[in-house]
Image (cartoon, helix red, strand yellow):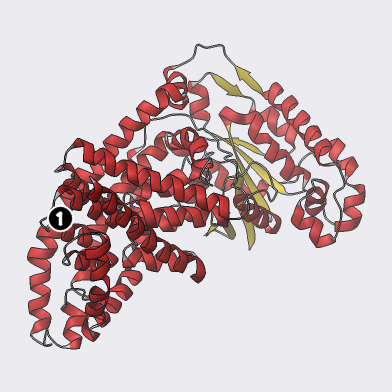
Amino acid sequence: METVVLAGNPNVGKSVFFQSLTGIYVEVSNFPGTTVDVSCGRYRNYSICDTPGIYGVSSFNEEERVAKEMILKSDIVINVVDAMHLGRDLFLTQQLIDMGKRVLVCVNMMDEAEKNHVHIRTDRLSELLGVPVIATAAAAGRNLKLVRENIAQACTGHKTKEIAAMLEKPLLVCGNFQEAVLLLEEDDFVRLKYQQKPCGMRDASYLARRKRVNQMAKEVLIKEERTTGFSEKLADILTRPATGYPILAAVLGAVFLFLGILVAQKFVGFTEGVLMKQFYEPFIVSAVGRFCDPGSGLGQLLIGDYGLLTMVPTYILGLLLPLVAGFYFVLSILEDSGYLPRIAVLLDRFLNKIGLNGRAVIPLLLGFGCVTAATVSTRLLGSRRERVIATALLGLTIPCSAQFGIILGSVSRLGLAYTVFYIGIILAVFCLVGKAMDHCMKGESSGLFIDLPRLRVPRPVNVLRKVVLKTKQFLKEAVPVFAFGGIAITVLEVSGILNWFIQCLSPLVTGGLRLPKEAAMAFIMGMVRRDFGAAGIHSLVLDRGQTLVAVVTLTLFVPCIASVFMIFKERTKGEAIAIWLGSFVLAFGVGCLLAFGLSLF
């Protein structure tokens, strides 16, 4: 069975080809980095692999390392290029040909090119490259059947003459064209494999390939003169700071109204408060109670306050499922429209100051839906250092939508001044902690190399598929974590350890935070579920200063038990413990300072 690898720049539509060939849906995204893993399937006698979007076969980042390994092992490469960025994308095409790979080229998005009065002579491009070239519009299904029927026609093409002349010595070292080209281009992994020093020919090889690609693009591209369209003007407005930031603020406000009000309060109020609390839980408690004493250890484990058949399904189906699906719905619209990478560009300079880059927009935004899901999404960040910083900031300063809705309700009762003060404190902690971690952790943040796709109206089918896929993936990872968390908290409650924790925390709550001792239970419950803690604070009778202290401390307090388990899964034990303890210390430290400051006034 031959291995066929789909390769191309980010946002060229490789995943649509993968779906067409294998019948498997893979996330289609307009944000580079969201497909870090390799997806594989079968088509006839071929093993088909979809790789992350790359600009060249090299090892400059995680996506390129993953894609390079698959390309080196492949028998055939289906190279998907964007008709609107032909000159850019053909650099990778020519590199694959220089490496001696059997290549089939698909010039995709021809429908968009035609709308923009761009015409491509694919027959002439095939002659110049020496490999089959098929014009496609994958999203519309145009010529996908032709691609499937012509995989076997893939062949080696015409190499760049100047590069072929440079390969004499590298070929003696490696014995094959693909590694010889990478050695010529000073790929670190290949150099170390053969213990070779940099040859100093990388720039010359790049320039030779770029010159050939530019000549080809000039010969096959026919562009008609046209005026700047509305899409281009809007794209410029969205990335210009003077106009981009106000628009971003309006978009985020709309996102909050949708997630924080409509989904987190209205819809979740129905799914959790009515469907699960009023119908499901009474039914399951009654059914299980016939065979098991609810007060026994087994009864507590199954149908207790934190039981596997009560809290776990209520939390997952009643609370998390609507929130996660709602957030992925918003995220999919932002991705499919092409707006999300523009948010990354706008915020890149700010995020650089705290050790991150624009890519961190995804997990930080996702955290306002669910910190557990956001912790998983930190995988797309370019380095371990960035993933640790992002995870710490998520656990410390980003309230999930369920918690944030309740907190906002508590703060809004205090008036506009207190609300602004609350937001200012959380933002200050976010910036100071990020800056401190950036200063203390070795290394530097990776740069933001991002392709800005064209703005377009999101495709409803694509959005729906992404919501279903991502929600299913999240539930697959989260359900075991929640089940284990329910067992752990039940054991703590039955053994009496939970009450001991409350007694230990009470002096700090009453003495340092100057809150009533009943607030200690709210913080303990916040460890289990953040909205439990917020609801506990909301139900207490507090003055304005105490309310501010309580909501600030609770926001900065340790993540819920599900998020903690996910942090331990994604990070090392040492990093996870440091993040958990750091959240605990900082939350009470900031809360105590705030309580002391308010007492002076």
Q: Residue at x 47, y 46 (%)?
A: 360
Question: In which image quadrant can residue 567 be found?
Answer: bottom left
The local secondary structure at tag 1 comes to helix
Can the viewer see residue 578? yes
Q: Position of residue 343 (x, y in %)?
A: 44, 35
Residue 50 appearing in the image:
no
Looking at the rendered image, the quarter that the N terminus falls into is: bottom right
Image position of 121 (left or right of 549): right
> What residue is drawn where x is 9% and y is 59%?
274
> What residue is shown at x 52% (from left), y 38% (from top)?
143
Judge the density around disc 1: few (<14), some (14-19), many (≥20) Cα neighbours within 10 Å: many
* Amino acid at pointer 1: His
Give the vertical position of 25 relative to 449 (above or below): below
Residue named by callout 1: 538
Which sits in the foreground, 31 or 262? 262
Is residue 121 found left or right of 177 in the rendered image?
A: left
